[in-house]
Image (cartoon, rainbow, N blue to C red):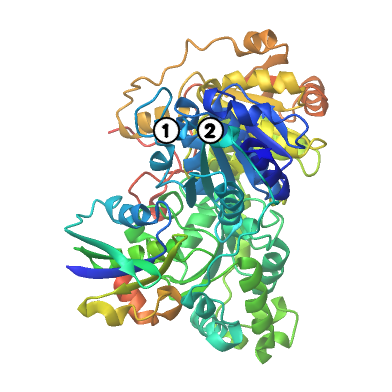
Amino acid sequence: MLKGADIVLKCLRAEGVELVFGYPGGAIMPLYDALEGSGVRHILTRHEQGAVFAAEGYARVTGQVGVAMATSGPGATNLVTGIADAKMDSVPLVCITGQVRSALIGTDAFQETDVFGVTLSLTKWSRLVRTLDEIPEAIAEGFYWARSGRPGPVVIDIPTDMLKAKKEFSGPVKFTPHARPADAKADGGFAETGITEKIVALLQQSAKPVALVGAGAKLSGAIPELRRLLDDLNIPTFATVHGLGAVPPEAPYYLGMVGMHGTRAANTALNETDLLMVFGARLDDRVTGEPTRFAPHAKIVHFEIDPAQLDRVRPCEVPVIGNLADTIPAFHAELRKIPTHSASSGQASRKNSETWGTQVPDFSSWRAVACGAERAELDPRGLAQPTIRFLDELFSRLPQNSVVIADVGQHQMWAAQRYRSSSPRGFITSGGLGAMGFALPAAVGVQLAKPETCVLCVSGDGGFQMNIQELATVRRLGLPVKMVIIDNKYLGMVRQWQQLFYQRNYAETDLSDNPDFVEIAKAYKIHSFRLNEDAMREFPVSTETGDEIDRFLQSQEPELLVFDCAPEANVFPMVPAGAALSEMLLEEEPTQ
Amino acid sequence: MQTFRIRYRNTQGTLMRILNAASRRALDLPVVQAEPAEQDHQVTLALEVNQKQAGQLYREWYGIADVVHVGSGSAHAGVWPAAHPPAGVPIEDSRAAARA
């Protein structure tokens, strides 16, 4: 006979779970009571939102399911932002919540919340467990849905009496989904569908084909296949913020990040293209700008695992539905069978415009726009120059395979613009939901998943305070997370919008009364120091400053570096909300 | 007004997820009829939607874990003849629907 709590933990182990993040409370106490000796390590955060973001960090960097635990009521509702974040960014996540005992459900009992109902629209699947017998199948099915297709969040809500009750346990179960009639159709092979021929025909008609890479390429594990295909296609390529690292920045056809704060080259290419090949991106408004004027001349070929992401902003001429790990190699193999293509090594064939019936775009000029004079492009007034240079210094000194976790705001976009790694899971951020406070707890999860890896957490002064309590988790575990606060004493991105679009009415964005972050870190017994932006005005930076940054990055202890940023530094280029990508601002225009 | 018939397994939350796909778009739900249908359940909805919304709903419903089949009961049924519209819809129909 085993208690329900023991069964939960055995089922978690059967799913390969070694690490869970959580915060205890009344309804989930039986599960905590059973942790010792279960083989599941629990990481205590200092807030349930910290737990769910940490689980997300773990999942994002490993590709495995992250697990968060919380009690009923406020514990469960504190998970909600993380659940929404996981939904938006396709993160496999299982949240296990304690619920009041079965007899009290629906009575507005102490710490009772309908977490099943609250999270219904945010989860891929959820279950309020009603009997002890349901626990193994609920966990097996929950993990299945969290991992399958487009990954996402799952909630399993277990009344406390189910966790305490005992029953015979015959072992974990496996979940097999019911087949649907249309699934077989969707799984049809490339050769039978004629998709390759359609795409090749579009390529042949295209004068300016481009490729856009999103998170789906990374989540599918199809990066090597994607890179081989892109090398062969050799067409201008750019990435969403979640696609960063999928394409090596040194690739001759790579134009950088696209979208609201993307490079001028990428946005120009996207605006001018007549054929857009999308690999695992949902094309949200931060990428498209005004949807009705997005890629106005383009036909779209969309490789996507989730049909619900198709045709949201624009119709696509050729949808290619399926896991990119399957569809990309299948398409590439078919492409290579086409005689005009397989006759040579891809690029040579591609450059023979007669072969494809297209004019190859002038990569060199687009590339020059992307890489030349880019600092000036990013910072016409010079206010952001020291911060951009600081991030360049940090990133250039990072050990290989480091992981950068960015919070949300101006620093996030500067970091995304300056990130230069080809590590597919090397840049992590809350891209879809844009949840401030994400970075520090996510860095905890990343560092626990990758104990030997240099983990750099870049936050703003606003976001850092949203989960500042997780400094205690960092200290307790002795995690060598390198934390950077870009401190401009404002909610910088909101202030930037206020400056540009609200006549400089800086309503409630002034954070000049920030606490002294260096002293706060010291109170947590974390080594901390401040770097003034003057240290970045000389180029190259002084040996002393460089050595200090190196020491910071190589430390085996947690460290906090506060970098003073000009309060009114702005992120450019910028596509204003509601504008087309072609209307990006390259500098500050007079406020209206 | 367009009629949709969605076959689903009557597991926790599945009907609510189906309805939520409409309510999150602020669509009125003047007709909702859920009933057993052979070994599954079926909900019939009448919604005032354009073709673009219909396409989005169709795909979103089909993405719900325990939805078995999504069908249309209106004159537009021919536009979405298969249960998996992105793969089954002719290109021109898909473009027309998305632009509507």
Residue pictured at 40% horizontal, 51% vertical: B13
Say whether marks 2 and 1 touch (CB < 8 Å).
yes
Q: Position of residue A338 (x, y in %)?
A: 65, 89
**Are there few (<14), some (14-19), or many (20+) residues within 10 Å of tag 2?**
many
Q: Return the residue nearer the eye: A276 or A147.
A: A147
Location of the N terminus of chain A by quadrant is: top right
Whether residue A342 is situated above or below residue B52 in the rendered picture: below
Q: Return the residue nearer the eye: A416 or B8.
A: B8
Whether residue A55 is situated above or below residue A134 in the rendered picture: above
Location of the C terminus of chain A by quadrant is: top left
Q: Position of residue B52 (x, y in %)?
A: 30, 66
**Are there few (<14), some (14-19), or many (20+) residues within 10 Å of tag 1?**
few
Whether residue A157 is situated above or below residue A316 in the rendered picture: above
- The amino acid on which the numbered mark 2 sits, given as a three-letter code, is Asp
Q: Return the residue nearer the eye: A135 or A121.
A: A135
Residue B11 placement: quadrant:
bottom left
Whether residue A314 is situated above or below residue A169 in the rendered picture: below
Indicate left or right for A562 with A382 as reference.
right
Q: Which residue is mark 2?
A: A161
Determine the secondary structure under disc 1. Answer: helix
How far apart marks 2 and 1 lie (CA) works out to: 9 Å
Q: Chain of mark 1?
A: A
- The amino acid on which the numbered mark 1 sits, given as a three-letter code, is Ala
Q: Is residue A387 visible?
A: no
Q: Return the residue nearer the eye: A267 or A365.
A: A267
Q: Which residue is mark 1?
A: A103
Q: Position of residue A201 (x, y in %)?
A: 52, 85
